[in-house]
Image (cartoon, helix red, strand yellow):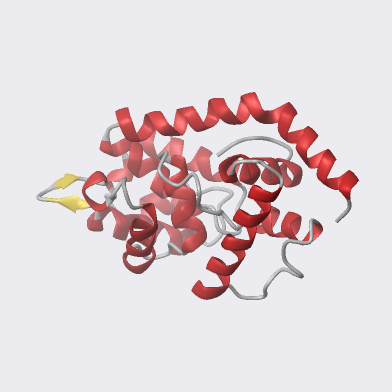
Amino acid sequence: MTTHEIEQLKELHGELEDVIEARLKEFDQLWLNADEDRLFEELVFCLLTPQSRARSCWAAVERLSSMGKLRCPAHGEIQRELRGVRFSRRKAEYICMARALFTVDGRLSVRSHVDPKNPLQTREWLVGNVKGMGYKEASHFLRNIGLGMDLAILDRHILKSLVRFGVIPDIPKSMSRSRYLKIEAAMADFARSISIPMSHLDMVLWYMGAGEVFK
């Protein structure tokens, strides 16, 4: 990592800052104003993203939502709409299991399982209870509903960039809890050292890999 590379990163952040702030404000509004179905859409999106393109996953969520299939009539019906999403059968099952988990007294209730004052504790609960949700997916979900701005979403784009900037020596072959938290802490230290907020840095690094600011 050179001073020039850091300056380029800061320059890119300056170019994207307004777009990033607008997107983060949208996330904030979800927790404040969205209904339970809308929050569940974000959780489904994050369950779909492992090893799949974000755009394809969100398109699948929109199809499922518009057809009323996120109520989980049968996981086979959901699977048919997961075009472009890898491991579609397994992920359809995850969606139905999540729907059952977040249904309280016959009604969908995502908020009742989320503590907005303690995203770290909520992340642990999500990882321990939502089938198919690891630390990356749980962090992504919390960020997307405005509650995980200091959490790292360690997908392949972010990890590659962290290697590039010398934050980590290489991309780990597997991601245990301790390894995830160690890399997250290293990323937070890096963010502080270059004066870019953690939530902004995530989106800048993702932009470098994907070419857009999305979700």
Residue 173 drawn at (x, y percent): 67, 75
Residue 6 in the figure: left or right of residue 86: right
Residue 165 in the figure: left or right of residue 181: right
Residue 76 in the figure: left or right of residue 8: left
Residue 182 drawn at (x, y percent): 58, 69
Q: Which quadrant of the view contains residue 179?
A: bottom right
Q: Nearer the viewer, residue 150 or 53?
A: 150
Q: Which quadrant of the view contains residue 40?
A: top left
The correct choice, above or below, for 101 with respect to 108 in the image is below
Residue at image location 69% in from the left, 35% down from the top: 212
Residue at image location 33% in from the left, 57% down from the top: 122
Q: Nearer the viewer, residue 202 or 90?
A: 202
The correct choice, above or below, for 174 with respect to 75 in the image is below
The correct choice, above or below, for 143 with respect to 48 in the image is above
Quarter of the image containing the C terminus?
Answer: top right
Circle count: 0
Quarter of the image containing the N terminus?
Answer: bottom right
Residue 111 drawn at (x, y percent): 25, 44
Residue 81 drawn at (x, y percent): 46, 46
Residue at image location 56% in from the left, 42% down from the top: 199
Q: Nearer the viewer, residue 204 or 42?
A: 204
The correct choice, above or below, for 32 with respect to 201 in the image is above
Residue 47 in the figure: left or right of residue 129: right
Q: Nearer the viewer, residue 22 or 82?
A: 22
Residue at image location 60% in from the left, 58% down from the top: 154
Note whether residue 176 is visible.
no
